[in-house]
Image (cartoon, rainbow, N blue to C red):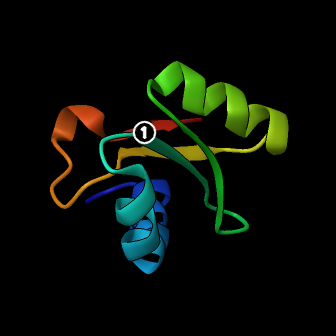
Amino acid sequence: MKPVLVVKGEEIYKENRKKLEKAYLGKIVSIEVESGTVAGIGDTLEEAYEKASRKCPGKKFYFRKVGPCAATSYLYFLL
């Protein structure tokens, strides 16, 4: 069973998939799952996290590599 954060994060990613894949293929996206906001995008997890934490301080994020098939190693969430 996947954590709720992962399930919600993937749902939000799928809603924004076409736009994200067109503009940010291969980048890391951070999604603030409570509001459904794409909170940050970067070349690295650290860059995406820094942008997300400035935009949505104190929130939980789901991280994923932008692309049609995200490898397990690129699926992240911080509690």
Circle 1 crowding by C-alpha within 10 Å: few under 14, some 14–19, many from 20: many
Q: Which image quarter: residue 73?
A: top left
Answer left or right for 33 relative to 63.
right
Q: Is residue 42 above or below residue 16?
A: above
Q: Residue at x 58, y 24 (%)?
A: 47
Answer left or right for 14 relative to 60.
left
Front-lying residue, 72 or 39: 39
Instruction: Kindly identify the amino acid type of the residue bearing the numbered disc 1.
Output: Ile
Residue 57, can we see it?
A: no
Residue 50, can we see it?
A: yes
Percent x, y of residue 60:
66, 44
Q: Residue at x 61, y 61 (%)?
A: 33
Front-lying residue, 23 or 46: 23
In the displayed orientation, state which residue is furthest to the front: 23
Q: Quadrant of the C terminus?
A: top right
* Residue where numbered disc 1 is placed: 28
Count of numbered tags: 1
Percent x, y of residue 40:
63, 43
Q: Secondary structure at mark 1?
A: strand
Front-lying residue, 46 or 27: 27
Q: Residue at x 54, y 20 (%)?
A: 46
Front-lying residue, 2 or 52: 52
Q: Residue at x 37, y 64 (%)?
A: 22
